[in-house]
Amino acid sequence: MDDMREMFLRLVRSKKGFCVNQTYSEHIRDSLMHVMFYLIADYINCERECDELGVGKLERLHSYPLAFLEAENPREWLEQNRTTDDLGLIMFIYDNVHRMTQGKHHRTLLYIINILDFDL
């Protein structure tokens, strides 16, 4: 992994001519929202890679609810209820952040949520 200071230095140097003459709170908030989105997406991917069935703990709760378990034909239920993207899963994880597997994704997401709650 690259040295963080060197990476930041490259970023700063790429902003040649930049003058601080306004507030950046809205930009910070929007950037943190994007980070949260990709952080949750990375969490889902990591959970899928680590699980022997390729489905994380929260994804099981989201994608295989009680209706699935009680269905007469689970395969048919899946076909009727399958989504074309993971946006619902992303929101489910955001809404259930306290149930995430402990680790860097969970901790970072909590930090970002706290930053946003304190209206940086």
Image (cartoon, helix red, strand yellow):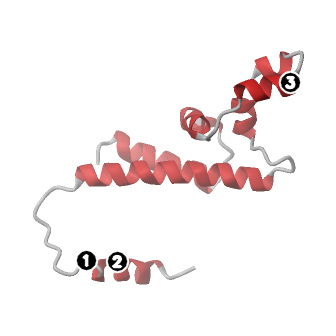
Q: Nearer the viewer, residue 116 or 93?
A: 93
Find numbered disc 3 in the image and state the secondary structure of the residue it sits on. Answer: helix
The mark lying in front, picked from 1 and 3, is: 3
Q: Which residue is mark 1?
A: 15
Q: Amino acid at mark 1?
A: Lys
- Using the numbered discs, state the Cα–Cα distance from disc 2 to disc 1 in whole angstroms: 7 Å
Above or below, 78 relative to 101: above
Residue at 55% of width from left, 32% of height from top? 95
Q: Which residue is mark 2?
A: 11
Q: Position of residue 51 (x, y in %)?
A: 81, 50
Q: Position of residue 104 (x, y in %)?
A: 60, 56
| 46 relative to 29 in the view: left or right | right
Q: Residues within 10 Å of mark 2 (few under 14, many from 20)?
A: few
Q: Position of residue 68 (x, y in %)?
A: 80, 22
Residue at 84% of width from left, 21% of height from top? 69
Find numbered disc 1 in the image and state the secondary structure of the residue it sits on. Answer: loop
Q: Check whether the beta carbons of the residues at disc 2 and disc 1 lie within 8 A of each other.
A: yes
Q: Which residue is mark 3?
A: 74
Residue at 17% of width from left, 74% of height from top? 18
Q: Position of residue 1 (x, y in %)?
A: 58, 79
Residue at 61% of width from left, 55% of height from top? 42
Pick whichever of labels 2 and 3 is earlier in the sequence. 2
Q: Check whether the beta carbons of the residues at disc 1 and disc 3 lie within 8 A of each other.
A: no
Q: Amino acid at mark 2?
A: Leu
Q: Nearer the viewer, residue 80 or 16?
A: 80
- Using the numbered discs, state the Cα–Cα distance from disc 1 to disc 3 in whole angstroms: 55 Å
| 65 relative to 88 in the view: left or right | right
